[in-house]
Image (tube, helix red, strand yellow):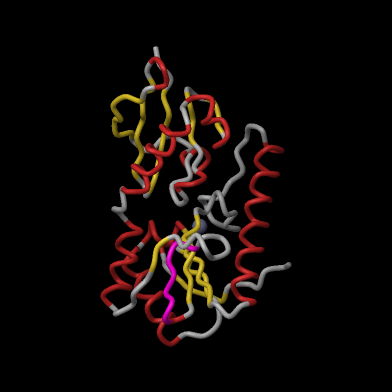
Amino acid sequence: MGRCLHLGRNGKFERVHAGAGNGFEAAEPLAQPAGACEDVDYTDGAAFAFTCCGQDLDSDDMVDVMSADKRSALMSRIRGKDTGPELRVRKQLWRAGFRYRLHDKELPGKPDLVLPKWKTVVFVHGCFWHCHAGCPYFRLPKTRPDFWDEKLRRNQERDETAISALIDVGWRVAVVWECAVRSDPDAVGRKLAAWAGRGKGNIQIEGLDQKVRSRQLPLPRI
Ligand SMILES: [Zn+2]
């Protein structure tokens, strides 16, 4: 029997079966796995995590289960699935007249959206992977707490470094939390559009208690 990978992105999950010789076979849709927030990062296709036959895997571990080519083909397939809540957020911005680039690799932190004309970037952050304090989607897994603690701390530092670098050179930054996108993507899009056009400072948009709210983004500590 081959191994299987549980993948997720944009709230959709699938199980991919690996056959002999690391060939990946048909993917089947997967109901959201229990503890998906712990296992699956569906906000950043480049650093997703998943379970493989019940074990935690790091992206480095993927090398063990599939070749670089296969991995990159699989990743681009996942990235290409631009449907769902994030797309709805973008549609609202587009409708409001904003034009953007996606996943700009040239900028610190590779922002999910870049609105060059407005010198504005948007990060869509998974609540677990980016440590959204006070959010129900953020809870430390019970297994291997030290591993997760260290991993998530590094993610947080990376975010702060990127945001700080962007602000230093005059970009405005919005962080949109996964909980907001899940709760009401259209409202998130409208709030982003209102802020991008007229708003001041840097904001975060969260979706706690079933309500989408925006507030100032705290300045990075570094
Ligand atoms: Zn959250």
Whether residue 99 is situated above or below residue 102 in the rendered picture:
below
Q: Return the residue nearer the eye: 191 or 164.
A: 164
Q: Quadrant of residue 101?
A: bottom left
| x and y percentages locating residue 221 in the rendered image | 72, 68
Q: From this viewpoint, is residue 208 visible?
A: no
- Residue appearing at x 53%, y 77% in the figure: 172
Residue at position x 29%, y 34% in the image: 29
Rendering coords of residue 138 (x, y %): 56, 50
Q: Is residue 116 magenta?
A: yes
What residue is shown at x 58% (from left), y 80% (from top)? 170
* Camera sees residue 156: yes
Image height check: is 9 above or below 188? above
Q: Is residue 81 above or below residue 222?
A: above
**Magenta stretch?**
111-117
Say which of 126 and 59 sits in front. 59
Position in image of residue 186 (x %, y %): 31, 67
Viewer-closest of 176 and 1? 1
Which residue is pictured at 48% across the width and 71% down the height? Answer: 121
Which image quadrant is residue 95 in? bottom left
